[in-house]
Image (cartoon, coloured by chain):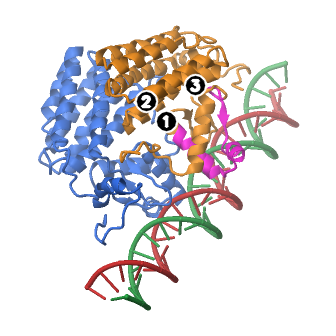
Chain colours: A orange, B blue, C red, D green
Amino acid sequence: MSPRAASKTAETSDKVSVICRALRRAIIEQALEPGAKLPEDSLGERFGVSRTIARHALGQLAAEGLIELRRNRIAVVATPSWQDARDAFDVRIQLERLVVRHLAGKLTKAQIAELNAHVDAEDRARGGSDPVSIRLATEFHILLAHMTNSPILIRYVSEIAYRCCLTLSLFSRPHSSECAINEHRAIIAALVRGDEEKVMSLMHSHLDSVAGRALVAPVPQRGRDLLDILAPYAEEAEGGRVVKLPKAARGR
Amino acid sequence: MSPRAASKTAETSDKVSVICRALRRAIIEQALEPGAKLPEDSLGERFGVSRTIARHALGQLAAEGLIELRRNRIAVVATPSWQDARDAFDVRIQLERLVVRHLAGKLTKAQIAELNAHVDAEDRARGGSDPVSIRLATEFHILLAHMTNSPILIRYVSEIAYRCCLTLSLFSRPHSSECAINEHRAIIAALVRGDEEKVMSLMHSHLDSVAGRALVAPVPQRGRDLLDILAPYAEEAEGGRVVKLPKAARGR
DNA sequence: TGCGCACGAATTGCATGCACTTTGATGGGC
DNA sequence: GCCCATCAAAGTGCATGCAATTCGTGCGCA
């Protein structure tokens, strides 16, 4: 391995990072939906560690924006707003343009093979269970980022890809199923040809269309959190205090 | 405050984030140089908290890439490689282009005043103590990011600005002193005019020149960590084991 | 003098315990 | 029947204690 090793990004010990990885994966496969509660002791019990460790893991995930931590409250999987999602995709596009710019014409044979193998796996997973195909589509982008060998790009692209994935599960239709596989193949081809301009615009439009398919409607808010939907209206009425509601609306 | 509040990015409680802020600031003002040790109990004692809290803060800082955490080892302020620094500036340029694109022509009067006041402060600090002027220059960019009101941009730009600041303290000459104040003023002017293209290219060249002033020589490695410099050579000799060195080279 | 080794001090890894906060339910007043 | 006070259960905030590891130093030996 090169001196500039692609070491894990920070992440203290093993136990903490194991929990982080597990939770990240559960989140992007939608086993944990936005808003799901993550009590420290349940986590600790589930992973065979103490609350201290579980807590530390939650701290890391919160730093990545995957979960939300509020003082004295149970941690929950993040529920990004539609605006957050738009912003995330904007940033992501710029970041991934950088990725493919770094990579154009510089891929080794082994890397090309790895990318092709990954897309083949995406192909096989199509029609299979949704969660897996979503995860694979996301991991394609993360795989690309890793090939840049730039720790910063790796970290940021991974983080934001996970977050985008999270928003997909909120705003996307049942599933428009990433028919993006062909676009992935096109990107690989352009990377191999070394056509920098072309691959950047391919990546740009690819992500644009993913975002487009996902974020069609600014309004739908498929009724995840009734209370939050009403909040803006309540705020206009009085000064930020949410008015008392007739006993209904329970997140879970 | 708007419903989409510019709340602190995650950061559990107060105590942890207080420590984080203090350390961040100490690092960018170069009170803590790259490689400086940060033992948990010293930190805890200094801030009047237990190791648990200090440890948590270190975890957060590590997630931001400001410090390095290795198992069973004392945390140290990060020492980015020259290549890391280049990558960081590349990413930063793209991110901050996004920032000014969002902002062009959309600044309120109050925001314009705030920006001008900040640059005035930079002006006053010029010639004063170096650390303060460095910090102010960095905070100008962070201030801009905050005005986008996009949590993701705020987080990423802040993080990467701090990291760039860190590399400056490693590779920059004694101090080429951010004669960039005029460039800051030019950026504000272009933002007010609402000239999107212009302000993006201004920001681009501004950061390019900051990076250029800082990262002139790919080789200098002003002898901070003798051991790391030798590591690659040792690695080529045998399989990643660093050969025993005659007792010299102590970090401190 | 220079090198290696071993032992003690320093430091981290992690679990547990206690105090405080939030949450939700139950019962009494209107 | 509805609203509010009170209280127990659940959960977090944080400190402390113990085991394991690393670091530094002094001693012995060549």
**What chain does mark 2 sit on?**
A
Give the number of the disc on residue A135: 3
Residues indicated by labels 2 and 1 sit on the same polypeptide chain = yes
B100 with respect to A215 (left or right): left
Q: Tell me the residue at 41%/59% (across/down).
A: B241
The residues colored magenta run: A32-61
Give the number of the disc on residue A111: 2
Residue A36 drawn in magenta: yes
Q: Nearer the viewer, mark 2 or mark 1?
A: 2
Give the number of the disc on residue A5: none
Residue C4: image location, x then y, percent: 42, 78
Residue B77 drawn in magenta: no
> In the figure, residue B251 lies in which quadrant?
bottom left
The N terminus of chain A - image quarter: top left
Is A47 rendered above or below residue D2? Answer: below
> In the figure, residue B158 lies in which quadrant?
top left
Is A18 rendered above or below residue A183? Answer: below
Q: Amino acid at mark 2?
A: Gln
* Residue nearer the viewer, A45 or A3: A3
Q: Amino acid at mark 1?
A: Glu
**What chain does mark 1 sit on?**
A
Residue that numbered label 1 is attached to: A64
Disc 1 to disc 3: CB gap under 8 Å: no
